[in-house]
Amino acid sequence: MALIKKFASILIVSSLLISFVLQASADKGIGTVNVPPYLPSACFGFQDKGVMIAAANQDLWDGGAVCGKYFQVTCTGPTNLGTPHPCTDTPTVTVMITDLCPPPGCKGDLDLATEAFSLIADPRSGGIQISYQEL
């Protein structure tokens, strides 16, 4: 029984360390909500890639090099006082980059499809603080 407890403790500590390292390497920014239609997209034209998608801002876009890449996005807090607690109980989602969110209309780093945004935050907030990293 003591061996099982030691093994369980090691697993818990290892999981916490991995989680900490992953969060430490994540970028921070603003996530905004994008409403349909999602087609055409700058990456895939009229090819439907579902709703777990996002558009990248000009800095992340990198001339389209980010097309088709997956990002893990986590809601970390509000951007305004109107929605003080926008994050859901499961504030992380994985999205594929399918489009460019061009300036000056782009107000964040990642513009998430409404369906993806709704999984991590209240869509009425419009924008949230996020951490994100390429997978």
Image: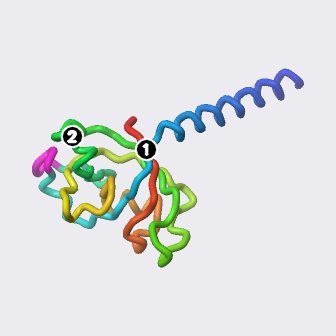
View extreme (top): residue: 3
* Front-lying residue, 40 or 19: 19
Q: Residue 114 — which label?
A: none
Q: Which range is magenta?
A: 42-47
Residue picked out by circle 2: 62
Query: Marks 1 and 2, Cα distance to the nearest angstrom?
Result: 16 Å
Please identify the dominant SS of the magenta region: loop
Task: Determine the residue located farthest toward the bottom in the rendered image.
Answer: 82
Cβ atoms at labels 1 and 2 below 8 Å apart: no
Q: Position of residue 27 (x, y in %)?
A: 43, 44
Task: Give amino acid for label 1.
Answer: Asp
**With 134 as the anchor, is 121 left or right in this view?**
right
120 on left or right of 3: left
Residue occupying the point 33% across, 53% down? 109
Identify the element where label 1 is drawn: strand
* Residue at the spot 45% in from the left edge and 67% down from the top edge: 79
When the figure is inspected, residue 3 is found, relative to residue 92, above or below; the finding is above
Q: Residues within 10 Å of mark 1 (few under 14, many from 20)?
A: few
Residue 44 covered by magenta stretch: yes
Q: Position of residue 70 (x, y in %)?
A: 34, 40
Q: Position of residue 61 (x, y in %)?
A: 22, 44
The magenta stretch spans residue 18:
no
- Which quadrant holds the N terminus? top right
Where does the C terminus fall, quadrant-wise?
top left
Q: Secondary structure at mark 2?
A: helix
Q: Which mark is residue 27?
A: 1
Task: Classify residue 16 by image quadrant.
Answer: top right
Which callout, 1 or 2, points at the residue further toward the start of the chain? Answer: 1
Residue 30, position in %: x, y? 39, 58
Q: Residues within 10 Å of mark 2 (few under 14, many from 20)?
A: few
15 or 2: nearer the eye?
15
- What's under tag 2, amino acid-wise? Asp
